[in-house]
Amino acid sequence: MEPRIVPRKEHRISRKQMSPNALRTLYRLHSRGFIAYLVGGCVRDLLLGRQPKDFDIGTNATPGQIKRLFRNCRLIGRRFRLAHLRFQDEIVEVSTFRRAAVPSDNADIEDEDQNKRRPYHVKDENGMVLIDNIFGTPEEDALRRDFTINALAYNIADASVIDYSTGLSDLRQRLIRSIGDPRVRFTEDPVRMLRAVRFAASHGFEIENDAWENICELSSTISRVSPSRLYEEIQKLFLLGSAGPAFILLDKSGLLAALFPGLAAWIREDDRRFQLLADNLECLDQLYRRGTPSSPAFFLSALFGPGIEEDAFKRHRDGIPHRQAMDEMCANFMKEISGTAHIPGKVGGRLCAILTLQSSLHRMPPRKPASIAGRPEFMDALAYLRMAAQAKNEYRTPLEWWETYLLETPPAGSTDLPTDEAPEKKRKRRRRKPRRARKTENP
Ligand code: ATP
Ligand code: MG
C-alpha cells in the first residue's frame, strides 16, 4: 500500500510542541544523511494536541552508527536493541527501523551490526514472539507496531506526516484498530490487549469491534506474559490518570479475571464491591489530575486493600492478633499475585504497612500521633483513610482529626508553613522523605 503523506501545511504538528532534545537528535541524524522520523505514540499525541509522554525516534542508522554519532548514547535492550540518548531530564529513544516476524526468518545475518548480536525472530509454540529484531524499512517498522494510531511517523526532512496504514482516519474516528489480524497480533504479544485497554481509557477512544471481540476471546492468554512485564503494564494502566475507565474495560473484556482471579471472585460475591473499587480508582485518577500521582503501593492498596482488610478482619475475629492477621493476609496476597505480576518485595511491604497503620489511624484519640505521622507510609495510609471515608462514608472523625493534626504540624518542607514561625516549632517539624513519582519505562 502506498503511504499517505500529509504535507506540513495540512497537519497540526508544530516543532514547538516537540522536546528540544528530540528535535536536535532528529536534525543531527538527518544532517548525517540518515532517515529520521518521530515515531509511535508521540506522533499520535501531537496530532491530538496532547503532550506526549516521551519522544521516540526511528532511523535507518544502525545501533552502532547511532552510538558513534551521539556521545550520550547507551545501547540497551533485551528484547530489542535500542539506543537511549540521555539528556539532563529526559531520555530520547532512538531505534533502527525493524520489521515484524515472518515464518521464514531465522538468524539471517544482514550487516556488521547485526552480525555481532545474531538477531532473529523466535516465536514460542503458542505463536508468541520471543525475539524480534531484524532491521527493516520505515514501512515495515510502521506495520510491526500494535495499532494504526501508533504507526504514524513525522519526517524531519520535510515536516510531513506519513501514514502507512489507516492511522489518520482512525485517529479522526477515535478508534483503536490492530494493524493486521487482531487475533494474530494479540497472540504474538498478549500485552497488546492491555495496551488497547490503556489507550481506550486514557484517550477516550473506542476499541474497534474485531479487536474487541478478540480481546474478549483471548483474555485468558494474558497469563503467558512474564510477571515482570505485567507489573510494568499494570502500573501504566492504573497510575497514569485513567485507572477508573481502564478497570471497567478490564472487567468487561475478561482481562481482570485473567489477571487477578482472586480479586474477580471477591468482586462477584457482592454487588457493591465492584463500585467500591471503581470509586477507589476514581480517587487515584483525581490525585493524578491534581498533580500528585500515587505510589505503586498506594495503587495496590486501592485495588486490593478492601479484600485483604476483609480477610484479615475475619482472621482477627477468629482470635488472631490484628497485626499478625494483616501480615498473614498480605503475605497470602503477595504469594497469590506472584504468578501474574512481579511486585517488588519493598512495594508489597509498603502495601502491608499502609493497611496495618489503618487501625492506629482509626483509634481516637490516637496513641503517640507524632510517631505515627513520622512513619514512612503515613501519607499513603492517610490517603487510604481518605479514600475509605469517601467511598464508604465512614471514618469521618479520625480523618478530620488527622487532617487538623497535619495542618497544625505540617511535614518538613511543606510550603504551607508561615515563614515567621517560632523557632521551637521549627525544631519540632518531622523529617520525612518526599514521595517520588515513579517513572515507568517502556517494555
Ligand atoms: P505512551 O503515551 O503510553 O508512551 P506509546 O504509544 O508511546 O504510549 P510506548 O510504550 O511508549 O507507547 O511505545 C512506543 C511505540 O512502540 C508505540 O506507539 C507502538 O508503536 C510501539 N509499541 C509499543 N509496544 C508495542 C507492542 N507490544 N507491540 C507492537 N508495538 C508496540
Ligand atoms: Mg511512548
Image (cartoon, rainbow, N blue to C red):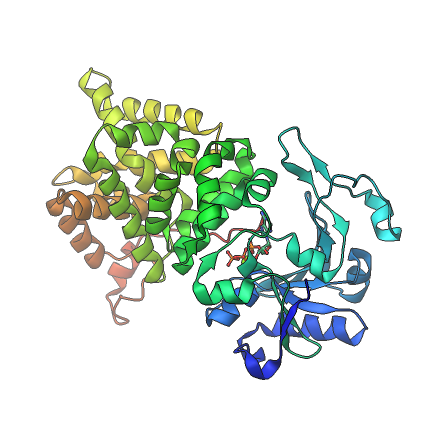
Q: Quadrant of residue 147?
A: bottom right
Asked if residue 37 shows in the view, the reply is yes
Pinpoint residue 284: horizontal percent, then vertical percent. 32, 51
Asked if residue 52 shows in the view, the reply is no
Q: Is residue 286 above or below residue 252?
A: below
Q: Is residue 195 left or right of residue 359?
A: right
Quadrant that contains the N terminus: bottom right
Question: Image quadrant of ligand 2?
Answer: bottom right
Pinpoint residue 407: horizontal percent, then vertical percent. 20, 58
Q: Is residue 44 above or below residue 298?
A: below
| Residue drawn 20% across the image and 15% down it | 318
187, 271: nearer the viewer = 187
Q: Is residue 399 left or right of residue 202?
A: left
Pinpoint residue 51: horizontal percent, then vertical percent. 48, 68
| Residue drawn 49% across the image and 44% down it | 193
Pinpoint residue 78: horizontal percent, then vertical percent. 69, 43
108, 414: nearer the viewer = 108
